Amino acid sequence: MTFPVVGMVGGGQLARMTHEAGIPLGIRFKLLSDTPQDSAAQVVGEVVVGDYRDLETLRAFARGCDVITFDHEHVPTEHLRALEADGIPVRPGPDALVHAQDKGVMRAKLDAIGVPCPRHRIVADPEDVAAFAAEGEGFPVVLKTVRGGYDGKGVWVVGSVKEAAEPFKAGVAVLAEEKVDFVRELAANVVRSPHGQAVAYPVVESQQVNGVCDTVIAPAPGLEEALALRAEEMALNIAKELGVVGHLAVELFQTRDGRILVNELAMRPHNSGHWSMDGAITSQFANHVRAVLDLPLGDPRPRAKWTVMVNVLGGDYPDMYSAYLHCMARDPQLKIHMYGKDVKPGRKVGHVNTYGDDLDDVLERARHAAGYLRGTITE
Amino acid sequence: MTFPVVGMVGGGQLARMTHEAGIPLGIRFKLLSDTPQDSAAQVVGEVVVGDYRDLETLRAFARGCDVITFDHEHVPTEHLRALEADGIPVRPGPDALVHAQDKGVMRAKLDAIGVPCPRHRIVADPEDVAAFAAEGEGFPVVLKTVRGGYDGKGVWVVGSVKEAAEPFKAGVAVLAEEKVDFVRELAANVVRSPHGQAVAYPVVESQQVNGVCDTVIAPAPGLEEALALRAEEMALNIAKELGVVGHLAVELFQTRDGRILVNELAMRPHNSGHWSMDGAITSQFANHVRAVLDLPLGDPRPRAKWTVMVNVLGGDYPDMYSAYLHCMARDPQLKIHMYGKDVKPGRKVGHVNTYGDDLDDVLERARHAAGYLRGTITE
């Protein structure tokens, strides 16, 4: 059969789960991975071990692929343009992806298309941070390097001009943002195909611990329908205006005064969409594959009243297998997703999904399982 | 992490889908495949190409595996015993598997444990077939070679002594069975773990066309609860008495006079359980992996009121990709499962699942998609 080959750059868990979703679609996967031990490299048939920062490695990898997509946003923009010049479809393309790579470019574009964001501007040095603070409500101020941050890295909350020195040491442009008085964080996940078909997943609540996603509840409990609709429309509009192909996650702040502000963008399957693997008719991973191949998209609607995802972080116990067995015995409905990664404290090594009609029960089951796997709950 | 390695013998679609189910479980897969192009070999990371009939190939393959399981039932029993003697757990083990390999052994065992079967006995030659017919209702009689048959191969329905010559030509023992006056075929799927935990999927209706499974409806429509329960208990009892570890499919005849008779056994994930991938809380493939690793089993209950599976057979069109695209566009809720196999007329190359509250709608959607992919429906 002449089914296409998807080239996936990056061997993390997102690539692993995208491959899993591609198997029933009959799609062949080719993986460019840093090492043969990477999460996805363990489970994909055709693996090239190489450095995605090297253009010739990327070019050689891309031969025989019908489309290139990504597990992360770190491939240099100029390499993506070179692949496109070679005639390889790159999805999302470099003109879209730059908005997820560079927070300065992202903020400028969102301003231009009228999407509400926290007050922000690029700052030159600690004194400029003080000036930025003075232009608004004062300190604290959030500082972010425009490139290279993830999971709380590259982000500082500073309370004074003295504390504002650190972010400037990396030699990368620094973006200052107001510290938003939010009641909670939400995420709007959408998928868009090259010919413009798009689907929106229900808006979810995302709970962070130490800057890392911990719990996602789908749909966001108690979210007003009008606000949910506005968030979905905002995400669909961003996907369209930025020319996104594939999955787009829009991380949002819901403010105390009822506004929705864009926090971050991610152009790939996203932690806030992992619930969809067991909770939606079509998972974010399946729809990402369908989108990058310009196949018709699948139904994103939920299959359960409530679905909860809790991340499993590495704890002090390198071997999770006996805890994993215990969790399966305790809850035969539990959906465990392990990434095949070595356990290191704080590292995302898996997630659990639960679903059902009673949110308290669904939350308790997911939190218990994730805590037990991590080792913070022992009974 | 010290997660185990499952060694899968055979590279067909059952191995492919078992690997898919093993990915979220964090289980590593090692595959022994006839060719690098086999359905599962396309998607598994660690593939050994070799002949499962060769003991040394099997032994070399088994090194580094924590357990061996199967995509098919063709591995010689003596090789399985040799692997066990080497200390490798083989699941299902040879003492159980022989009942799925040899229909004579299977019938004798089912008789011994009191499971109702069609009237049957081993026959020596065509004259003996005539005698068997005369002992009951006369011709037609069903003849089966005791080993080597599948999907209608190795099975003959003969109307006279003259027609009874063919089955004896292979030099394999031949089993004669009454031609059961059944109203429909059912299948009871159960999964059993080494320490004896077992789960039963709802009994399904299985519709055959030309001896090949075409449509499965879960649960079997209009099946009396008492009869469904009896079928589940029968399958659980067979699994226990035969010492099955892993998935057991019990194919059943529902007779006009309200009895349930065992037609065939399969000790591996089975076509009559493919609906569970999208229709059950835990799929047959995930539970097979859990069982062979002696992990607690997952909940087998349905997630939808009705789930329908229809096989996609190869038709006259070698390229299904445009039909596949059409089906996705027509029905965004459709679950397509392609096996990556070359299209040959009549070959199982995939299946589709649909689910919902309205059986007529669910059936129509699945049949339309499968027919469109095959090329028998063009609008």
Image (cartoon, coloured by chain):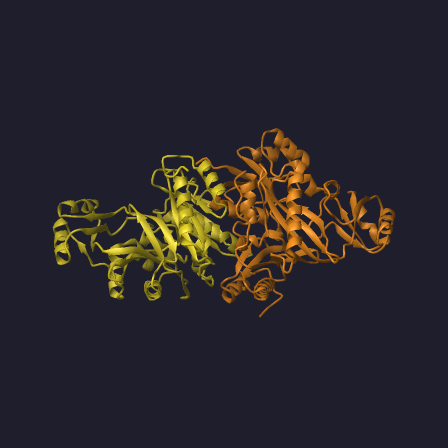
Chain colours: A yellow, B orange
Residue at 58% across / 57% down in the picture? B351
Residue at 24% across / 52% down in the picture? A146
Estimate the x, y position of residue A339 in percent, counting from the top left: 43, 44
Nearest the eye: A310 or B105: A310
Q: In the figure, B332 relative to A74: above or below?
A: below
Residue B139: quarter of image: bottom right
Estimate the x, y position of residue B43 in percent, counting from the top left: 51, 47
In the image, is A308 to the left or to the right of B221? left
User: Which residue occupies the extreme front position in the image?
Assistant: B226
In the image, is A107 to the left or to the right of B326? left
Q: Considering the image in quadrants, where does the C terminus of chain B appear?
A: bottom right
Q: Considering the image in quadrants, where does the N terminus of chain B appear?
A: top left
Q: Let me know if residue B75 appears in the view.
A: no
Q: How many marks?
A: 0
Nearest the eye: B232 or B159: B232
Estimate the x, y position of residue B221 in percent, counting from the top left: 63, 60
Estimate the x, y position of residue A279 in percent, counting from the top left: 45, 55
